[in-house]
Each structure stands twice: as structure tokens, then as C-alpha cells.
């Protein structure tokens, strides 16, 4: 199959993109609005950008031309918490993607517990093994939507002790969830390992 991107409708392009870019990590993002109302939603257009400082990217589409709550909240509060959902939390994570009114608290909707964060006003999901407190570094509008693309600088990592091996999260213990095409998901419970090529020895 060979397709010119310009021949695809928006819907077709989305279907193809999410089936080709697999697996995608999921940023499960909590934010607050100006009235301190909390919001929680998952985003798989998510990736690492830099490590020093730690910066990640989250891309939020529009809903019927309007900004989603996460994008609106990020633009006014300029901070959030990004959680990495694991297999045990996958159903609750998906439940928080429901298209509900601005005033609806997805923590309550999914039966999740809030914990106060240290650097930001948005609360953390107590049940999540990894949570990253972050500040808005940059916002860009990209594409025809346009999408709201956020660069978020992580200021604090919270990692639950039981997923740590040698001081970092172990993917097999964590079983982090990835999004595939359609309604598909995978997890990192069975990773494999490959050694990188060694640089040639100088003679
Ligand atoms: C696993 C998963 C990944 C998602 N990824 C994205 C994404 O990358 N960008 C996006 O705009 N919406 C994405 N969505 C849809 C949003 O979660 C959904 O529109 C949600 O209602 C937005 O919530 P908000 O209005 O509270 O911000 C995803 C949904 C799921 C279940």
C-alpha cells in the first residue's frame, strides 16, 4: 500500500497515524482551572523531547473546534501532573477520556484518589506508580485543527518504590500501558533486551 498524505481525509489520516505509530505511551494528565476544579484525561500524542531539563510533549486536538478542558486549563494554570498508567489502571484511565462537561471531575468519575502535589496545584492520582509534576514551557498551535501542542518541563518525579529496580522504574514490574490503533492497547509486562553495538576499540 502506498498513500499520499494529501489524498487522506482528516479521519483517514487519524486512523492511519494511530495504527502506524505504535505503541504510544500515554500521558494521563491532571490539571486545574482558575476555580481550582480538577480535570484528568489521557493523551497518547505524547513523547519525550529533552532530558536536561526533562521536557515532554503532549498534543491535544480540538473537540468540535473548541479547546478540550486539559488544553484550556494548561493555558490558564500553566502546570499539570503527567501520570503513566499501568495495566491495573487501564480501564479507569480510559474511563477518564469520557466527553463530559467542564465541571465534571474525572477523578470522581473513575473512582480515583487525589493526593496534593508539591510544585503544582493540580493533584496527583494516588493509585499511579509514576507521576511527574510539570510546568508549561511552550505552547504551539500545529496543523489544521489546530492541535494545541504543549512542551511541559518536569520539575518533580514521584515513583512508587515497588516498581523500582536499580533506582529506576522497571517496565516489567510497572506494566505501563501503550495505545495502539482503534481501541487496542498493550503493556510492557514482557520486554526484551538488546545490547547496543560497542564503539570500535582504538588501536
Ligand atoms: C488512551 C487514549 C489516548 C488519547 N489520546 C489523545 C491525544 O493524544 N490527543 C487528544 O486530543 N485526545 C486524546 N484522547 C481523547 C481525550 O482523552 C478525550 O478527548 C478527553 O475527553 C479529553 O478530556 P478533557 O476535555 O477533559 O481534556 C485519548 C483518549 C484515550 C482513551
Image (spheres, rainbow, N blue to C red):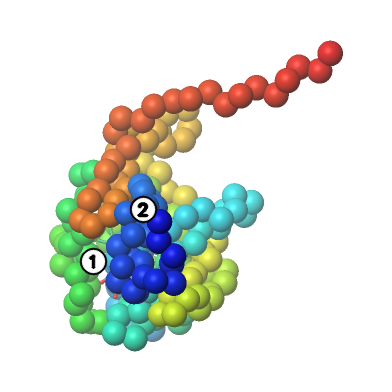
Q: Residue at x 55, y 61 (%)?
A: 153
Q: Is residue 25 left or right of residue 180?
A: right
Q: CA distance from mark 2 to mark 1?
A: 32 Å
User: In this view of the protein, which residue sits in the foreground, 143 or 178?
Assistant: 143
Percent x, y of residue 197: 61, 24
Seen as rendered, the residue at the extreme right is 203
**Element class at badge 1:** loop
Question: In this orientation, which residue lies closer to the viewer: 34 or 142?
Answer: 142
* Visible residue check, residue 115: no
Q: Nearer the viewer, residue 21 or 39?
A: 21
Ligand 1 has an atom within 8 Å of the beta carbon of the residue at disc 1: yes
Residue identified by numbered label 1: 97
Q: Quarter holding the C terminus? A: top right
State the residue in front, 77 or 117.
77
- Please indicate, yes or no, whether residue 68 appears anywhere in the rendered image: yes
- Count neighbours of disc 1 (C-alpha within 10 A) and say few if under 14, some if 14 to 19, many if 20 or more: some
Furthest-top residue in view? 203
Name the mark nearer the viewer: 2 or 1. Answer: 2
Residue neighbourhood size for the residue with mark 2, other residues' Cα within 10 Å, grouped as few (<14), some (14–19), many (≥20): few
Residue at left 43%, top 58%?
46
Identify which residue is drawn at 49% across, 69% down. 150
Q: Ligand 1: which quarter?
A: bottom left
Image position of 9 (left or right of 105): right
Q: Classify residue 131 as left or right of residue 63.
A: right
In contact (CB < 8 Å): disc 2 and disc 1: no
* Spot occupied by residue 96 in the image (x, y as percentages of width and height): 22, 65
| Residue 30, image quadrant | bottom left
Residue 123 vertical position relative to residue 63 in the rendered view, above or below: above
Q: What residue does disc 2 label?
A: 1
Tell me the SS state at disc 2: loop
Amino acid at each position: 500500500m502506498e498513500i499520499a498524505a494529501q489524498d487522506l481525509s482528516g479521519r483517514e489520516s487519524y486512523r492511519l497515524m494511530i495504527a502506524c505509530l505504535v505503541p504510544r505511551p500515554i500521558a494521563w494528565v491532571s490539571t486545574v482551572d482558575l476555580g481550582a476544579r480538577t480535570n484528568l484525561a489521557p493523551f497518547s500524542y505524547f513523547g519525550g523531547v529533552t532530558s536536561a531539563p526533562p521536557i515532554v510533549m503532549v498534543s491535544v486536538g480540538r473537540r468540535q473546534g473548541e479547546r478540550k478542558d486539559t488544553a484550556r486549563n494548561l493555558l490558564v494554570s500553566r502546570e499539570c501532573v503527567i501520570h503513566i498508567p499501568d495495566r491495573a489502571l487501564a480501564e479507569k484511565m480510559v474511563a477518564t477520556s469520557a466527553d463530559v462537561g467542564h465541571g465534571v471531575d474525572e477523578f470522581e468519575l473513575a473512582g480515583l484518589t487525589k493526593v496534593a502535589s508539591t510544585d503544582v496545584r493540580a493533584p496527583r492520582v494516588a493509585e499511579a506508580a509514576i507521576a511527574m509534576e510539570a510546568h508549561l514551557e511552550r505552547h504551539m498551535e500545529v496543523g489544521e485543527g489546530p492541535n494545541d501542542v504543549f512542551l511541559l518541563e518536569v520539575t518533580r518525579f514521584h515513583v512508587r518504590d515497588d516498581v523500582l529496580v536499580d533506582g529506576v522504574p522497571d517496565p516489567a514490574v510497572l506494566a505501563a500501558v501503550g495505545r495502539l490503533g482503534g481501541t487496542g492497547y498493550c503493556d510492557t509486562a514482557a520486554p526484551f533486551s538488546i545490547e547496543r553495538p560497542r564503539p570500535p576499540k582504538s588501536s
